[in-house]
Amino acid sequence: MKLSTALAAGLLAAAAATAASAAEAADLTVKVCPAEALHAYPLAAGTRFQSLIVPSLAVANTGQTPAELTEVTLELLDKGVAVDSRRLSGEALAAGLKSGAAVQGGMLQMFGWQFCDGRLLGEKPALSPAPSLAPAAAGLVTNQVFGWKGSRDALRITATAMRAGKPETATLTIPVRADTVKTKMVFPLKGRWFVAVAGTPHGGHRWALPEAFAYDVARIGADDKSFRGEGAKFADYYAYGEPVLAAGDGTVVDVVADQPENPDVLRRPGESFEAYGDRAGAIQMALVAKGDRAIAGNAVIIDHGNGEYSLYAHLRPGSIKVKAGEKVSAGQPIAQLGASGNVTEPHLHFQVCDGASPLHCAGVPLAFGNVELPYADGPRAIQGGDIVVAR
């Protein structure tokens, strides 16, 4: 069937207008890291109070002309209805973009995993410290924190910009998940333990993407110290050498067993906290510069299926009992607790991630079937500072 010239011209014009509109909408994009879903963490089961940190969001100008970012709105949704909202504009937006652009000073290169290894910002990002976005530039906003009581199942982010005097918007909606690991898990240590750091926002882990829900676990003695005597050597620490257990059934996919322990990381008797912080910080930065293996120390990674990988880090040299490819069962001894890698004293760093890496992955909230919290007012998620008894 032939079209009349007028009709064909009209259809072509409409198609061109539609294409122009789509291209114009695509000239501003919103991305989040991690991109698949954001995990909330329960603070108290009885009140259904939860917390959420949005580690990084980027608004990119993919067009050929400059754009002036005027507003970024974050809305927490429950079944499609906005329940909570935050609007960044004016001074608040400018301050957020300035802070985000500062990561180009070295953090982006050293801690690329925090920004999804280029998937958020590209391989050679040009971050703007102000709302004016040149072509190919992006604005980065980090660490947006939320807390709520009840249910939230998605986060909608809307960016608004002016381009050549006309408003332009881009919207992204990402699921918010309140679930925990699918794998049936047991605590990776037996007995009574002190969880120094967990998934609560007052601990440093929560602000780092791979270890957002990780635990640092130590043992406290009757004197409320983690060591006997002066704590001058690793063997003085109550936790040192304790058996580390596979948290769930799975297959060992990676083993690192060549990392040393450095007794210089221990705080010396009589050393001030400030002096120790400076000295330990220098040791830690040297390890960070060496990469993942030096940071995690001797480590085991187990694939549990469901896209869930558990990491057992800082293990004692010579203690690892498993090898890559080996099947393991929940509760099986796999190593001994140690002090290799980036530590300040012997402890177990335990996390579950969505990838087989200590750092290049996103953390998943944990849950165990064999723990009691003797000082909690009821069953709830483990928080930093809890005493845990694993049966």
Image (cartoon, rainbow, N blue to C red):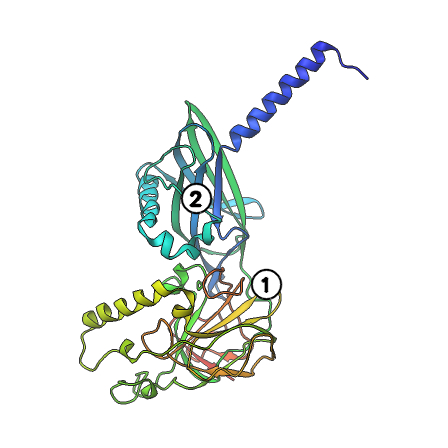
The answer to whether residue 203 is seen in the rendering is no
x, y percent for residue 289: 34, 63
Q: Which mark is residue 366?
A: none
Residue designated by label 1? 307
Locate residue 214 relative to residue 78 in the image: left or right. left
Helix, strand or loop status at disc 1:
loop
Cβ atoms at labels 2 and 1 below 8 Å apart: no
x, y percent for residue 243: 47, 85
Q: Tell which of 331 and 381 is nearer to you.
A: 331
In whole angstroms, how far apart are the C-alphas of marks 2 and 1? 26 Å
Please report the residue visible at 47 percent of the width from the left and 39 percent of the height from the top: 158
Q: Tell which of 6 and 109 is nearer to you.
A: 109
Q: Earlier in the sequence, mark 2 or mark 1?
A: 2
Residue designated by label 2? 58
Please report the residue visible at 42 percent of the width from the left and 23 percent of the height from the top: 164
- Up-down relation of residue 324 to residue 45 (above or below): below
Locate residue 89 relative to residue 121 in the image: left or right. left
Quadrant of the rendering where the N terminus is positioned: top right
Number of marks in picture = 2
| Amino acid identity at mark 2 | Ala
- Up-down relation of residue 61 to residue 13 (above or below): below
- Up-down relation of residue 274 to residue 120 (above or below): below
Helix, strand or loop status at disc 2:
strand
Which residue is situated farthest in the right direction here? 1
